[in-house]
Image (cartoon, rainbow, N blue to C red):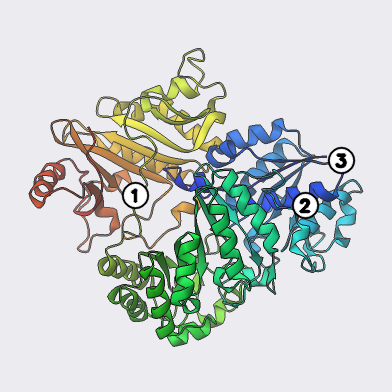
Amino acid sequence: MNVVLLQLPVQSHDYAYPMENMTLGAGYLKAYAESVVSDVRIVLGPKDLVNYGGDAALEAWIVAQQPDLVGFSCYVWNVERSLALAQRLRARCPRVRILVGGPEVTPENDFLMAFGGFDVGIIGEGEQTFATLLSALSKGFSTLKSIPGLLVPSSTGWHVTQPRPPIHSLDAVPSPYLSGALFPSDAGTMLLETVRGCPNRCTYCYYHKRFPRVRHFSLNRLRQELLWAAHHGVSEIYFVDPCFTRRKDLAALLKAIEEARRLHDFTFQCEATAEDVSPALAQALARAGLSQVEVGLQTINPKALARIRRPFDRNRFVAGIRALRDVGIRVMVDIMVALPEDSFDDVKRSLDFVVDQALYDELSVYTLSLLPGTELRRQAASLGLLYDAKPPYHVIRTPHMRPDDIRRAYEYAQAASGVDFFPPEPPLFLDPPQVRHHGSLVVAFPVEKTLDLFSGHCAATEDSTRNGDASVGQALTVYVSQDTVHHLENPAVMSVLLKIFEKNPWSLLSLVITLRDRHFPWPAVFKAAQRVLAARDHVMDREVFSTLDPVRSVQILALLPVRGSQRLLARFPVIDAAKLEEPPALSPSTAHQAWVGLPMQASLHEEALWMEALWALFPPHIVHVRLGDGEIFS
């Protein structure tokens, strides 16, 4: 039996998130199944293709493997793309069975079951269920309802089989690293799990439902994995435990980390509860190489904390954060917006608490998502929480916060902390006009090359691709200059561009503009961007609270001349081209705001001169500017 397993990455225009993608869950499935099931070939999708490839490239590779079963690890960031790819595979290869697993697979996920496109889902811990499923497939799908831990089709929709008990000994699951299933990410990082389960019962989280009690991988197993990391030159380990500092033999684990670091000096990151950290523990963590810790504060409002069932001790929290920072460990503090019982003023108080007392090195502010299967999701109606039914399931209104209040919370957070929570993502290549590749994938090209590259007109040229649309990456950059912008008004060029995104509906698009003077025909660019946006429904376009620009899957960037050959990078919100000349409302929205990156070392005089030059070059709908950190391009 041929089996293919994939975990599609968090997408980004700059490929930073895909570089970090590691298929830890799929690696566990492969390692365990191959240890107990015979006559099975399990292939993890090659990371260059899975992490960087567009949908057409992924589809072509999977079909070429002639699989009997294709499995997708589904998370909030990739579930739609995974299911859409699964539907395409079923249409092309009807005999292939589609399996889904991961946190998104719960019997309470109406979105997942309504979308369909799969034959069976694994609920909860997957190793034993997956192995049993492989053994049963030869007997036909009629036997699946007797296997615990599955979501299977039935005459009335979907049927949930009986729950599967957790694996008694986690060491029964072979290490995906020691077994050769996984290797470090392209960023040189590694994910490592030391426990399964969480002592907390936060109502917004599903993790503790999957693993109702805390179980531990043995220290001996972890010591071998740490030595593997050192021998493979890992630069940083991300421990995925929800409360790393609660491990019962933490001192021994830290000593094992120190021993491995003597072979190769890596660092590590983890999540922890600040109240657990004493000065002595902070020193031990620093000696072991902890570089950054993530601390989930969420809120300081007692009513909201009670509703989400999260403990908080103000004095111990402050002491723990200071102990960590005193020994040089960076602290990232999380604050959640739109929690039940929290008002705009409550969010302000939480922000003031951490900002005024300097309790962070990095501040993370994000909107509450009502994840399927969580207690808070079930209580949404009674609590008056309105949320998006599609991923990432953001809360968009509560009895205490209107949408404008949620946006104002981010504005306040930025003003209070100086942190840009919605920074632009400059693509890999900003210097036109070459055709650029990431491995065999096309990731950037000049607009005038569109027909040559993707319509087959010049199949023999050096810059052409062998597989046409199947060779594009998960994010594309199209260069447009003042001399070539007319190509966007060519129906043939626009038709080919739209065809690229029809075959790769989840690929991101950056239009990078280089201007010569103020007479640039902006409507052509905005029309092109809007047509790509209108052709799909992308998860990255559902961010509605951004203080910069809520559109993310398509972005317009410009390299604007300021002096001689010097250029600065600007980003403009994608709006309807017909509205470019319309006067803005009395209170301009983010649709009328540009972002401009300025060098940190620039003087106020230089900034004033640059901005004076830039205003004349902006599209007509821009009435105010937000400044960020950038660089000078030549």
Q: CA distance from mark 2 to mark 3?
A: 14 Å
Marks 1 and 3, the one that precedes in the sequence: 3
Image vertical order of residue 595 relative to residue 336, above or below: above
**Numbered badge on residue 424:** 1
- The answer to whether 516 is drawn above or below residue 144 in the figure is above
Q: Is residue 493 visible?
A: yes
Identity of the amino acid at label 1? Pro
* Residue 115 in the image, given as x and y percentages of width and height: 65, 54
Q: Are marks 2 and 1 in contact (CB under 8 Å)?
A: no
Of badges 1 and 3, nearer the viewer stands: 3
The residue under the point 50% across, 35% down is 473
Please, is residue 591 above or below residue 430 in the view?
Answer: below
User: Which residue is more in the foreground, 469 or 524?
Assistant: 469
Pointer 2 or 1: first along the chain: 2
**Label 3 packing within 10 angstroms: few (<14), some (14-19), many (20+):** few
Question: Which residue has dot 2 on it?
Answer: 32
> Residue 335: horizontal and vertical position, in percent?
41, 71
Query: Can you identify the residue that label 3 sits on?
Result: 39
Mark 1 crowd level (few <14, some 14–19, many ≥20, 10 Å Cα): many
Tell me if label 2 and label 3 are in contact, CB under 8 Å: no
Question: Quick one: quadrant of the C terminus?
Answer: top left
**Percent from the top left, x then y, of residue 534?**
45, 45
| Left or right of 375 in this view: 462 | left
Q: Secondary structure at mark 1?
A: loop
Q: At label 2, which amino acid type do we have?
A: Tyr
At mark 3, the secondary structure is loop
Mark 3 or mark 2, which is nearer the start of the sequence?
Answer: 2
Amino acid carrying mark 3 in the image: Asp
- Is residue 115 at least partly visible in the picture? no
Q: Residue shown at 44%/53% (left/top)?
A: 541
Q: Are marks 1 and 3 in contact (CB under 8 Å)?
A: no
